[in-house]
């Protein structure tokens, strides 16, 4: 029998009210939480967050604006791994500038991302230097982890590219566009909707 992987719910509580519950394999969920709050437009930057307290199943966030809780107007896009997103695709924005990242650089970067039976990814600067890695049970969670890591460390996402090992759905592409990641290298398959989202936003797929 194959090895079983832990899948646990993590509830995100914002200013005392339950906002989002995610199913995750992440041992430290804080990057995931920061990324999810950003890509769901609950916060606009880490500066909006006053404090974070976490345990095994809950992460409590207090924002500087105590009325921050209502999520953006949404239309259903996709859901996987216990999380669904509903943000109006017309509000994703566009990629302003696409850095020069070669396919060879992307492939070298991909070699630094460990293989996973689920999904794995990495965030890199435009020269191919590793910024952070993530693994989880869904590609959406991988993106939220990478984005959260970047935000917490002051990384300018417009000067990065991401690698995803696994298939990519529109929800994951949505998160990349919202975060302003301009280039993405996917080793697996893309859904037609995710490809259209990237094309419409000007995100370069390698």
Image (cartoon, rainbow, N blue to C red):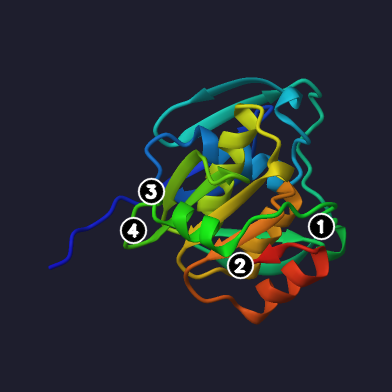
Instruction: Describe the element under mark 3 as helix, strand or loop.
Output: loop
Residue 92 numbered tag? 1
Query: Where residue 138 appears, x then y in whole percent?
Result: 47, 59
Instruction: Work out how far the residue at label 1 is from the one at label 4, CA to CA, in angstroms.
Output: 29 Å
Q: Residue furthest bottom?
A: 192
Q: Do callouts 1 and 3 mark residues in contact (Cβ within 8 Å)?
A: no
Looking at the image, can residue 12 be seen? Answer: no
The foreground one among 205 and 139 is 205
Q: CA distance from mark 1 to mark 3?
A: 27 Å
> In the drawing, does residue 16 fall left or right of residue 82?
right
Q: Which residue is mark 2?
A: 206
Mark 1 / mark 4, whichever is N-terminal: 1
Please give the name of the residue rendered at 53% of the width and 41% of the height, measured from the top-left corner.
Answer: 32
Q: Nearer the viewer, mark 1 or mark 3?
A: 1
Residue pointed to by mark 3 = 25
Secondary structure under badge 2? loop
Is 111 situated left or right of 124 in this image?
A: left
Nearer the viewer's eye, disc 1 or disc 2? 2
| Residue at figure coordinates x 77%, y 20% from the top left | 64
* Mark before the other along the chain sequence, 1 or 3: 3
Q: Dot 3: few (<14), some (14–19), or many (≥20) neighbours within 10 Å?
A: some
Could you say whether the residue bearing mark 4 is in a helix, strand or loop? loop
């Amino acid at each position: 029998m194959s090895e079983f992987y832990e899948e646990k719910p993590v509830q995100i509580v914002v200013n005392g009210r339950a906002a989002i519950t995610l199913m995750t394999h992440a041992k430290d969920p804080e990057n995931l939480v920061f990324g999810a709050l950003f890509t769901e437009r609950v916060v606009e930057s880490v500066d909006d967050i006053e404090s974070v307290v976490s345990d095994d199943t809950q992460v409590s966030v207090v924002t500087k604006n105590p009325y921050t809780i209502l999520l953006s107007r949404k239309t259903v896009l996709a859901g996987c791994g216990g999380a669904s997103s509903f943000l109006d695709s017309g509000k994703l924005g566009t990629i302003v500038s696409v850095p020069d990242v070669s396919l060879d650089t992307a492939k070298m970067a991909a070699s630094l991302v460990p293989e996973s039976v689920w999904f794995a990814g990495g965030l890199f600067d435009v020269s191919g230097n590793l910024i952070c890695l993530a693994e989880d049970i869904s590609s959406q969670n991988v993106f939220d982890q990478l984005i959260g890591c970047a935000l917490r460390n002051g990384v300018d996402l417009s000067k990065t590219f991401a690698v995803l090992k696994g298939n990519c759905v529109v929800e994951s592409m949505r998160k990349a566009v919202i975060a302003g990641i301009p280039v993405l290298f996917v080793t697996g398959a893309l859904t037609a909707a995710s490809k259209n989202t990237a094309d419409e936003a000007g995100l370069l797929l390698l």
